[in-house]
Amino acid sequence: MEKNTAILAVSFGTTHMDTLERCIAATERAVAEGFRGYPVYRAFLSAMVMGRLKEQHGLQVDNVGETLARIEGDGYGQVAIQPTLLLRGYEYELLAKETEKAGIRGAIGRPLLEDARDCAALASVIIEENPLKEEEALVLMGHGTEHEGNEIYHIMQNVFAEKKYPAFIGNVYGTPSFGDAVEGLVRQRARRAKLLPLMFVAGDHAKKDMAGQEGSLLAAVRDAGVLPEPVFRGLGESGSVRALYVERVRETMMKLS
C-alpha cells in the first residue's frame, strides 16, 4: 500500500464522553495499531452531535466533507473510509454521497452487518461475551430504520435461533419491536433477561430507550414478569468487535492498492 494513503474512521457520533472514549476512540486506536504508519482521522455524521460536543465539551469534530478536505490538504492522495455503522442504511448512503463529492480518491468499507455471514460472526462474539444462566435470556436493543437495510436485524435474529442461543432483538424503531422481543422471552419462559445495546455506542438510546423507567425496553420486559438487568456496553467496547472493524479496513485498503 502506498504511503500517501490515509484512513478515515466515520461514526454517527455521541455526546456521551464515556462511551465516546470506550467505543469510538478505542476502535480508532485499534485501527491505528493494525495499520501503523497510516494516519487515522475521525469524522462524525450527526450535525446535532457535533454541535453539542463543541458547545458542551469544547470538542471539535469535523464532518465527512471537512475531514476529507483536510486529509487532501495534508498531502494524502487517497483514503480508506471505514464507517462504524451497524448496517447499510441512510447514514451509509449519506457517507457515500459525501465521498463522491470529495476531490480525493476514496474507498468505503462495509458496515459491520451486511449479510448472514457477518451476522454469524457478530453473534459468535455476543454469545461468547454473554454467557447465560438457567432461565436467563439476552435482549438486544437495536435502533431500527425504515430503510430496507433493516432486514439485517431479522437475519441476525434467525442466526441466534439457529445457534439455539436465547437472544431476542427489539428495535427502538421498526421491527423486530420491543413487543417482539418480549414475546420471545415469554416463549423461552425466561425469568431474567440481560438488556444490551445492539449499537456501536451506549449513549442516549441505551440510557433512555433501553433502561428508562417508562416506555422503555426495561419497562416492557419488567411488565412481562421478567427481571431485567440493563448492561451499558456498546459493541465498540468489545475487542473482538473492534477486530472485525480492523478487518473491514483491511478489505478497504485492498480496494485502493
Image (cartoon, rainbow, N blue to C red):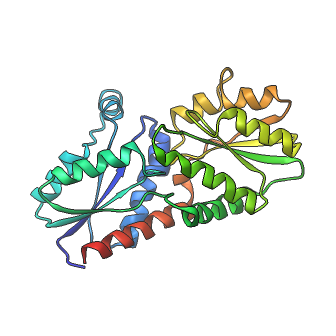
| Near-viewer residue (121 or 52) | 121
Question: At 78% from the left edge and 42% from the top edge, which residue is drawn?
Answer: 184
Question: At 36% from the left edge and 66% from the top edge, which residue is drawn?
Answer: 32
Farthest residue toward the top? 214
Q: Is residue 132 above or below residue 185?
A: below
| Near-viewer residue (170 or 243) | 170
Which quadrant of the figure has residue 76? Answer: bottom left
Residue 195: x and y in percent read 70, 41
Quadrant holding the N terminus: bottom left
Can residue 229 be seen by looking at this rendering? no
Give the left or right position of residue 167, taking residue 25 as reference: right
Quadrant holding the C terminus: bottom left
| Near-viewer residue (24 or 190) | 190
Residue 135: x and y in percent read 89, 47
Q: Is residue 129 above or below residue 53?
A: below
Which quadrant of the figure has residue 254? Answer: bottom left
